[in-house]
Image (cartoon, coloured by chain):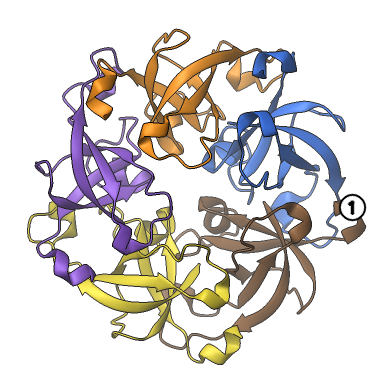
Chain colours: A purple, B orange, C blue, D yellow, E brown
């Protein structure tokens, strides 16, 4: 999983029917994880993370299947909130 | 999901039978997402995005399964149109 | 999907039984797609592309499932030939 | 599979129900593997690796399915401990 | 598929039960394929490649499913040996 910080959210009104009800968060990977360009991802949030929180993001089929949304076109999902970012230092 | 802008379309006459009827859009990731080389992708468009629109692109198995085209060789699909690109700043 | 040009082919006599009969093409991503290092891939060709043709390559599970070779260890497949490369400019 | 070293662990109290009981390790890819930016990953540890141990990490659907946690949103898992790191020189 | 050269092997005694019996090879992508950092991967060898041989490596779910080890945490597998490396020039 990737570790990143929630830096915003995103609204899409015209979208796949299978995404209706999904909340989209913009997540930026942490420098401390050596994430290169820090490419931001849009992840569906099933946990209820707030702006500024440090989160675990699952990518690929794990995002869809593990979150119980097998028929939704989701390739990234927030699946946990990190308790203490000092663990990453 | 990736966020990018539709910069064009592409026609393929000789293609897999499972792709007949699919519309191919060329999408360029946004600089504001820190997307590195901004590598462009060809995504199947199930939403009906126009040139210049900012879109959400799902990649991997999410593109195929989530769009209800489980037997088509699709690894990227436009699954939403972003309402307001100021959300990404 | 990636867009690239077929620059050669490759023969493998000792291979997985599930690959017997597959034709392997070497595809180089196009600079115009901003593909970074232009890392070449070996893709199974189900379309019959010739050297120099510009093709669509599907990667990941799409290559295998979408091409009807679910039990073959294929992670990249040529799934279409691009009609007009001017569409990419 | 990636080869990396366990450099820490991470606690997430608020997380997907399907991750309850999972132990998260922070793994840094080895320079000797030419891993570029050495981007760190968070991997579920099913083996019981300790800090400093050199491990094999499986990514993608292999992490979830191969570890018998098909419904958990896991995209990286420690699946082995490397006996002798001199094998990598 | 990636093309690389087998540069070594790796032993893991403590590993997932689903990996018992698997042989791990260290594969380095070829410069001629423009593979960027040449990041090495550990691939399960189902073909019996020797050190120095040039091989085809399938990644992702193709490695696991295509090799008939659907329940093993394998994300890369050697699936063929390249007959003539001059084909890559």
Question: Against E32, is C6 above or below?
Answer: above
Q: In the picture, residue D41 is in which quadrant?
A: bottom left
Question: Against C80, is A6 above or below?
Answer: below
Question: Against D55, is B71 above or below?
Answer: above
Q: In the picture, residue C9 is in which quadrant?
A: top right
- x, y percent for residue B80: 33, 19
- x, y percent for residue A29: 30, 51
Mark 1 neighbour class, 10 Å CA radius: few under 14, some 14 to 19, many 20 or more: few
- x, y percent for residue C2: 61, 33
Question: Against A24, is D31 above or below?
Answer: below
Q: Residue at x 64, y 63 (%)?
A: E38
- Relative side of D45 to E71, left or right: left
Q: Nearer the viewer, residue C33 or E53?
A: C33
User: Which of the chains bears the disc numbered 1?
Assistant: E
- Relative side of E26 to D24, left or right: right
- x, y percent for residue B81: 33, 16
Q: Nearer the viewer, residue D47 or C2?
A: C2
- Asked whether residue B9 is in view, the answer is yes
Q: Which residue is mark 1?
A: E87
Q: Residue at x 36, y 61 (%)?
A: D76
User: What is the tally of numbered marks visible in this picture?
Assistant: 1
Please identify the quadrant where the C terminus of chain D is shown. bottom right
- Asked whether residue B1 is in view, the answer is no
Q: Residue at x 67, y 37 (%)?
A: C77
- Relative side of E35 to B44, left or right: right
- Disc 1 on helix, strand or loop? helix
């Amino acid at each position: 999983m990737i570790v990143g910080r929630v830096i915003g959210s995103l609204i899409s009104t015209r979208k796949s029917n299978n995404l209706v009800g999904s909340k989209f968060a913009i997540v930026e990977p942490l420098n401390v994880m050596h994430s290169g360009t820090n490419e931001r991802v849009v992840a569906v949030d099933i946990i209820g993370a707030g702006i500024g929180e440090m989160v675990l993001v699952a990518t690929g089929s794990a995002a869809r299947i593990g979150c119980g949304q097998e028929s939704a076109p989701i390739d990234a999902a927030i699946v946990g909130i990190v308790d203490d970012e000092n663990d990453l230092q």
